[in-house]
Amino acid sequence: MTKNGIDVSEHQGNIAWHEVKDKIDFAIIRAGYGRLTTQIDKYFQSNYDRATAQSIPVGAYWYSYAMSEDEARLEAMACLEIIKGKKFEYPIFFDVEEQKVLALGREKVSAIISAFCEELEKAGYFVGLYMSAYPLQNVTTDYIKNRYAVWVAHYGVSKPSYSGRYQMWQKSSTGKIGGIAGNVDIDECYVDYPAIIKEAEKNGYVKRKQAKITIEIEDHIYSGLLDEQL
């Protein structure tokens, strides 16, 4: 299966989601960046509210500047504060692309990624990693590549040069879609994240079960099923 989507931030400005909805299968929305809640993407709340109002499945991403594990945990705390109370059918991605971060090397970069992702997982989120193909191949450990969902960026090619497994591909940064002024990133997804995330009870989703109940009233016995949240 291939699902077609976009990822957006405040750089796309005011999006006409009612025009976009029939052109995409999902959207990944930037929640913010850095380690402060004041660094929320100024269009995050609007994009989330208006996309979900159009029944568009959404995920989110957090742009990182973390230079250490401690800084990554601070970024995770800020991200969690921003996204709390919301539901996401797609993962929460950790966006690692700052050159000064990548220059730290494979072990330090991987430790930073783990620190952020572990905090989000402890809070009940399905997390993933966003990186360009070359640093993903060369500046992360095999453990990271195999442990987390991977969203790889590589433009102008028929498929990413990254040789590892990946579930999403950001294939262009110059897409054009009615309802969005200017360029927008274009993505493909190859797994059914909404089904996976809901089954795993992540990202704000909780399964419901039915309990059989029996009630006796004036010598009459009544039975039925009651929806009960797990």
Image (cartoon, helix red, strand yellow):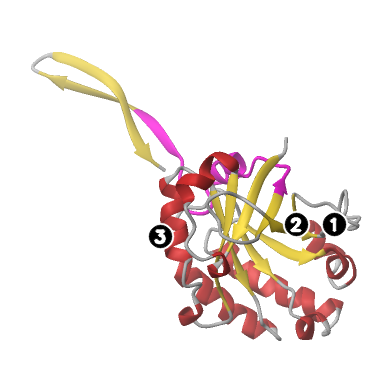
The residue under label 3 is: 85
Question: Closest to the observer: 216 or 46?
Answer: 46
The label number, if any, that marks residue 172 in the structure image: 2
Pointers 1 and 2 in contact (CB under 8 A)?
Answer: yes
SS category of the residue bearing label 1: loop
* 135, above or below 70, in the image: above
Pointers 2 and 3 in contact (CB under 8 A)?
Answer: no
Q: Amino acid at mark 1?
A: Gly
Pointers 1 and 3 in contact (CB under 8 A)?
Answer: no
Looking at the image, which residue is at 60% across and 56% down?
A: 126
Looking at the image, which residue is at 74% across and 74% down?
A: 97
Mark closer to the observer (1, 3): 1
Q: Position of residue 179 (x, y in %)?
A: 52, 51
Q: For the magenta stretch, what is the residue range?
A: 188-211
Image quarter hosting the C terminus? top left
Looking at the image, which residue is at 76% across and 82% down?
A: 101
* 73, above or below 19, in the image: below
From where the camera sits, is residue 167 visible? Answer: yes
Q: Position of residue 189 (x, y in %)?
A: 70, 46
Spatial CA distance of label 1 from label 2 is 7 Å
The label number, if any, that marks residue 156 in the structure image: 1
Q: Amino acid at mark 3?
A: Gly
Question: Closest to the observer: 142 or 191?
Answer: 191
Q: Quadrant of residue 4?
A: top right
Q: Position of residue 32 (x, y in %)?
A: 54, 72
